[in-house]
Image: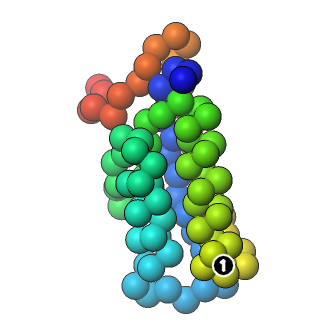
């Protein structure tokens, strides 16, 4: 496993009316099942894991969009890493 990074992302289904946020809630279940540490905020979800683990999680979320027949979506993604240093989800000031 590589160095632990942060990935902040937001899943946005397009051309879909989803007032109950069912796709987002299902994506949160995928995140929980990944075993990665995570924090859910009003604007994004942040996970901590190796780059490979983050890639696998995003692939799982993409698979979810296929299973839910979401024809178009956006994932806004930000990554934060630090050379030879594991990051944690504790409050960093």
Residue 78 lies, with reference to residue 68, above or below; the image says above
Closer to us: 31 or 19: 31
- Left or right of 32, for residue 71: right
Q: Residue at point 29% right, 26% down?
A: 93
Q: Residue at point 44% right, 79% down?
A: 22
Closer to us: 84 or 32: 32
Find residue 62 and report its image quarter: bottom right
Q: Mark 1 — residue?
A: 70
Q: Quadrant of the N terminus?
A: top right
Residue 85 lies, with reference to residue 44, above or below; the image says above
Task: Measuring from the top left, give residue 85's x and y in whole percent.
Answer: 46, 14
Task: Measuring from the top left, give residue 17's x and y in whole percent.
Answer: 55, 89
Residue 79 lies, with reference to residue 29, above or below; the image says above
Secondary structure state at the residue bearing disc 1: loop
Task: Measuring from the top left, give residue 81's x and y in whole percent.
Answer: 53, 25
Q: Residue at point 65% right, 64% down?
A: 63
Q: Residue at point 56% right, 49% down?
A: 57
Q: Residue furthest top?
A: 84
Residue 6 lies, with reference to residue 62, above or below; the image says above
Asked whether residue 34 is in view, the answer is yes
């Amino acid at each position: 496993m590589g160095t632990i990074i942060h990935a902040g992302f937001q899943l946005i289904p397009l051309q879909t009316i989803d007032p109950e946020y069912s796709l987002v809630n299902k994506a949160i279940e995928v995140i929980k099942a990944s075993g990665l540490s995570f924090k859910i905020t009003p604007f994004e979800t942040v996970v901590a894991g190796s780059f490979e683990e983050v890639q696998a999680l995003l692939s799982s979320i993409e698979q979810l969009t296929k299973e839910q027949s979401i024809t178009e979506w956006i994932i806004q993604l930000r990554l934060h890493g630090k050379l030879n240093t594991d990051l944690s989800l504790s409050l960093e000031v």
